[in-house]
Amino acid sequence: MDPVTTLETPPETDLPPDRRRRRIIGMTVWAVAFVLFVAFVGVPTSDPLTAFGWLWLATIAWRNYQPWREHLLFLRDWLPVVLLLVFYNVSRGSADKLFAPHVQFMIDADEHMFGWLTGGRIPTIWLQQHLYDPSHVPWWEVVTTMVYISHFLTVPTVAVVLWVRSRGLSYRFMRRWIALSMAGLVTYFLYPAAPPWWAAENGYLAEPVARFSSRGFDVLGLHSAGNTLNALQVEQSNPVAAMPSLHTAYAMMAVAFFLPMVRKRWWPLLLAYPLAMTFTLVYTGEHYVVDVLLGWFYVGAIFLTVGWAERRWAARKR
């Protein structure tokens, strides 16, 4: 029997009216509290404990009719993952201490790939020269900000939804997520790579590059959320962790995991998300295209490696 099937949570399509009412009330309270938190504090992006605290509360609100021992299973399954992600966040900020950052390779790679189309410029500079206006925030920068911030929420949310619906699928997803994160972290230690905005600030690019991934929050009036993201980028992130781009790798992983489970006619819609993340990262000066391509390569390599290990483990258990 398929181990994933045996671990699936039975569908709750016929909830009694009282449970359905409790679910609606619980999720409404959670949603209002989360919106207020984002408005006054910011999107929980910097601390995995905070992010998963909100996600745990969401699972409680969704199944608030369950006994507490069911809700505590979340802590049992997720605390090791969260602690590992805390370690990842803390150590990532020290990943630029061993070696000097690499800069020129990414510039040369993007110019060689796209210079024929951009007049010899890297795509980031070409896009900003055609679309960026420092005195005005256009509507598409609201979209790019939302896409950028989704990096911090999409993968944890998918993992938690899978945990509620199918424990087997959630464990498979988490194995790929953790492996991808650790592979990226090791690369950041061994090959620190500077993004376009850093290269421009330090004189490696002749033309300026703006960094403005949070500007869309100003249009929405979520100034605290924008300030939180800006502080995260300045104080807690590794400024030379551009290669591979885990932003786009996470987006591709979240989509690629589900591609075998959906009809191919839905693939373009799903793949629009990592493509939107790619545009966002390149346009806002956060990454080169070569960073994105390497991130996608890491996803493929991790899926192949973890899938092979899972099959080997399943064969040994037979």
Image (spheres, grey):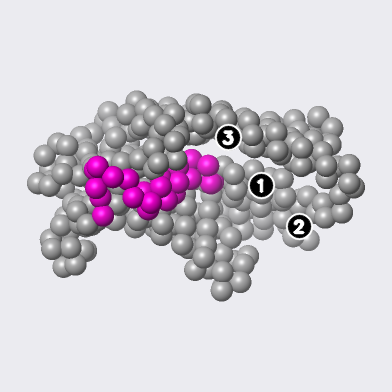
* Residue 19 found in image quarter: top right
Q: Estimate how packed mark 1 is, as few (under 14), some (14 to 19) or many (20 or more) residues with alpha carbons within 10 Å.
A: some
Q: Which residue is mark 1?
A: 161
As measured in the structure, the alpha-carbon distance from the residue carrying label 3 to the one carrying label 1 is 19 Å
155 vs 228, nearest the viewer:
228
Q: Estimate how packed mark 3 is, as few (under 14), some (14 to 19) or many (20 or more) residues with alpha carbons within 10 Å.
A: few
Percent position of residue 52, x then y: 60, 33
Between circles 1 and 2, the one closer to the viewer is: 1
Q: Amino acid at mark 1?
A: Val
Q: Which residue is mark 2?
A: 5
Asked if residue 175 lies left or right of residue 239, the reply is right
Q: Amino acid at mark 3?
A: Val
Mark carried by residue 69: none
95 vs 45, nearest the viewer:
45
Q: Which residue is mark 3?
A: 35
Residue under the image location 83 percent in, 42 percent down: 21
Q: Secondary structure at mark 1?
A: helix
Q: Amino acid at mark 2?
A: Thr
Residue 302 shows in this picture: no
Residue 84: say if magenta: no
283 vs 25, nearest the viewer:
25
Percent position of residue 60, x then y: 74, 35
Q: Which residues are magenta?
A: 131-155
Residue under the image location 53 percent in, 68 percent down: 267
